[in-house]
Image (spheres, grey):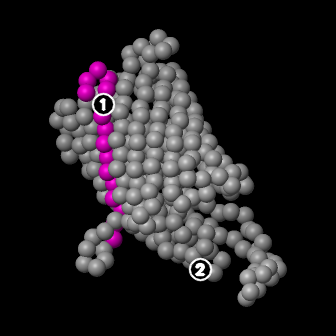
Amino acid sequence: MNARRLMAAALLAAAVPAARAAAPGVGFGESMFSLTSARQAGSGGIALEDLWRQGSGVEATTVVLTSGLRWFGLSTQGGASPRLRLCFDGFYFAPKSVTRTFEQTDGSYGGTAGTVSSSEWGARIDAILVVVAWDPWRIAVIGRTFGLNQTLPDVVNAGVGADAGAQAMLNLGGGRALTGWALAGPLGWGANRLFASELTLGAGFLQQFGAGFLGGPEGFAAGGEGLRLSERLLSGKLGLVYWFGRPHGKGATTYLRMGLRYLEGTSQPAQPRAGLGILWRTDAGLGIQFDYAVAPMGEIGYEHFGSLGLRF
């Protein structure tokens, strides 16, 4: 695979950060962030590599908290035409029933009675359309729609939303490229004006080597991303991934990842993250990939991410 195709594939991934599926709600899950792959989680939450976005594939992901709570996700993606890609992601979360507790009117403990349960599921569809493909530039627009259904003990909430954005790549030659992306949403209308609950801006750099530290093909990608929420809270991400091998060539490719996520107002605002992965590709081009990542969540414990996918 030549460097230009490699950089284009990386851009398509980097410009699509983790999706949100926000819905009105009460109690747990008022604002739900849908599942993130282990590749993306390990690099600070930024999709820096995901090189298989140039082809098609299917992937299953699970996220486990120290407490045992677990999310499940499934994603598929492929090219609908030479310039259009469609991606589908879905997730499901259903914790075990827990004991229902009560409090008195004065706020003191009121005892227990029975159990309660809850569940959430959601899905999104991304469309990425390349509108400019003139060297050294490649520019695309992004459209996203998503929905969430949340079942709580006393109420069922459902919501849908949409995001819009754009991405660009500047090919610097020599296996190097600069990337940038912007995304706004969920989009809404109020007070006779269009507004977005969140605004995301990001940039990255990619380098592919013909011969790296170990004498073979290697590469790395690094980037940063900023997010401003409607509550005026800020979130920032930094990520780095380094790979040994040729991701679209026969044999094994090994990935090392690290990153940092800052999320104002959470139990642990600064969250360092790390991960690793391995991709094995056959002569026929079929790739099998496993990735793992871990992230601390303050008093909640740790998040463990695992993804298993097939690339075609």
Viewport quadrant of the C terminus: top left
Q: Which residue is mark 1?
A: 177
Q: Please give the name of the residue rendered at 34% of the width and 65% of the height, measured from the top-left corner.
A: 196
Image side of residue 197 versus residue 267, left or right:
left
State the image quarter where residue 224 is shown. top left
Highlighted range, magenta: 172-188
Dominant secondary-structure state across the stretch colored magenta = strand
- At horizontal 33% and vertical 31% (from top left) the residue drawn is 7
Q: Residues within 10 Å of mark 1 (few under 14, many from 20)?
A: many
Count residues near mark 2 (Cα–Cα under 10 Å), then give few for <14, some for 14-19, many for 20+.
few
Q: Secondary structure at mark 1?
A: strand
The structure residue drawn at horizontal position 76% and vertical position 75%, both measured from the top left corner, is 100
SS for callout 2:
loop
Q: Which residue is at the front of the view, 234 or 12? A: 234
Q: Mark 1 is on which residue type?
A: Ala
Q: Residue 115, located in which quarter of the rendered image?
A: bottom right
Which residue occupies 34% across, 41% down? 203
Placement of the N terminus among the 4 image quadrants: top left
Position above or below: 289 against 110: above
- Residue 112 percent across, percent down from the top left: 81, 78
Residue 292 rendering spot, x and y as whole percentages = 60, 38
Query: Hey, which residue is sitting farthest bottom in the picture?
Result: 105
In the rendered view, would you say 30 is above or below 275? Answer: below
Residue 8 magenta: no
Q: Residue furthest top?
A: 215
Residue, disc 2: 155
Judge from the rendering whether residue 268 lies leftward or rightward of residue 138; answer left or right. Answer: right
Query: What amino acid type is highlighted by mark number 2?
Result: Val
Asked if the residue at tag 2 contacts the one at tag 1, i.e. Cβ–Cβ closer than 8 Å, the answer is no
Residue 176 within the segment the image draws in magenta? yes
